[in-house]
Every structure is written in C-alpha cells, then in structure tokens.
C-alpha cells in the first residue's frame, strides 16, 4: 500500500469559536481510509473529537467521511457543526467533491447537525454484514450526501 500524502497546512484549524488541533494522522488500511483526527478545543479545553476521512471505499458508504463526538457536558453548543464546517476545507484540499455523512437512525442530534450542513438524505439502511464495523443488532444508518 502506498503512503498517503497528508497536508501539514491543516494541523490547526480555527474559527472565532473553536480550534481543531491534530492529534493523529492515520495512513489507512484495507478497510479504513486515511484520516486526520483532531481534538475540538474551546478556550484550550478539549470538548470533543472529529475525524475527516479522505477518499472512498466500500466501507466509507456506511462509515461516512466525518466522525465526531462531543463530550456530554459540552453538547448543545453546535461544536460538532462548527468542527464539521472547519474540516470541509481538508476534504476540498484533497480534491473531494462530495462526502458521505452517516449516523445511527436514532441519533437525532447527529442527524440535525448533518442536515444543518446541507447534506441530503440518501437512505436509511441496515449496513451489510461485510461492512467492517457490522455487529448484530446494529441500528439502521442514515446515509447522507454532502456536495462540497
């Protein structure tokens, strides 16, 4: 497998509300796409994490290109939305024209964030058994497309 070319221009991303600081760059493997992984910081306090996965493969349809989690005590402040807006520039710099965004069907906060970004719902589907993160009793996934 060839080495993925990370761009160092994106180690720190910031707007007037949050700062994303790179915590890991992962080269990818047969299942996982290469990704940038950031701490989401507000006033130097880590309030959550976000990753942006670059490229496409079979698993990215169910896994999506962006993954985020906000620590429980910091939820409700639009930090996931703001962090997503910041990482879109990373995807664009790598030549990606659209992203797949996914979440559990019952994750209302997450799909509201995805819809606020302007993504279009493609389908709600149970992932296939050959998806790398498949597990019995897995919830259906809401699959969205976001044009950049």
Image: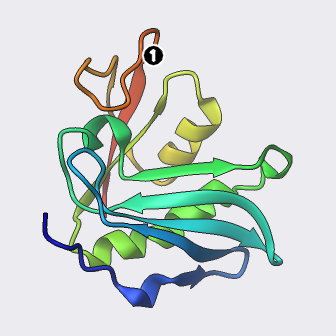
Residue 18 appears in which quarter of the rendering? Answer: bottom right
Quadrant location, the C terminus? bottom left
93 over 1 or under it: above or below? below
Q: Position of residue 109 (x, y in %)?
A: 64, 37
Nearer to the camera, 27 or 7: 27
Which one is nearer the viewer's eye here, 5 or 64? 5
Residue 102 percent location from the top left of the image:
41, 38
x and y percent of residue 141 in the render? 41, 25
> Where 131 sits versus 50, above or below?
above
Left or right of 128? Residue 70 is: right
- What residue occupies the far top of the structure in this picture? 137
**Image coordinates for residue 128, horizontal then vertical, percent:** 25, 20
Q: In the figure, is residue 31 to the left or right of 41? A: left
Residue under the point 67% across and 66% down: 40
Q: Residue furthest front?
A: 1
From the viewer's perspective, is residue 57 above or below residue 26? above
Q: Name the residue at 41% across, 29% down.
A: 142
Which residue position holds label 1?
138
Q: Secondary structure at mark 1?
A: loop
In the shown orientation, is residue 145 left or right of residue 136? Answer: left
């Amino acid at each position: 497998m060839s080495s993925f070319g990370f761009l160092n221009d994106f180690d720190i991303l910031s707007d007037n509300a949050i700062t994303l600081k790179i915590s890991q760059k992962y080269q990818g493997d047969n299942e996982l796409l290469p990704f940038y992984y950031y701490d989401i910081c507000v006033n130097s306090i880590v309030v959550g994490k976000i990753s942006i996965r670059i490229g496409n493969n079979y698993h990215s349809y169910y896994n999506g290109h962006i993954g985020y989690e906000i620590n429980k005590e910091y939820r409700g402040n639009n930090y996931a939305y703001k962090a997503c807006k910041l990482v879109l520039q990373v995807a664009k710099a790598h030549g990606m024209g659209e992203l797949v965004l996914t979440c559990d069907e019952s994750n209302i906060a997450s799909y509201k964030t995805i819809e606020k970004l302007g993504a279009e719902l493609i389908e709600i589907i149970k992932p296939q058994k050959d998806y790398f993160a498949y597990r019995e009793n897995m919830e259906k996934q809401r699959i969205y497309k976001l044009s950049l």
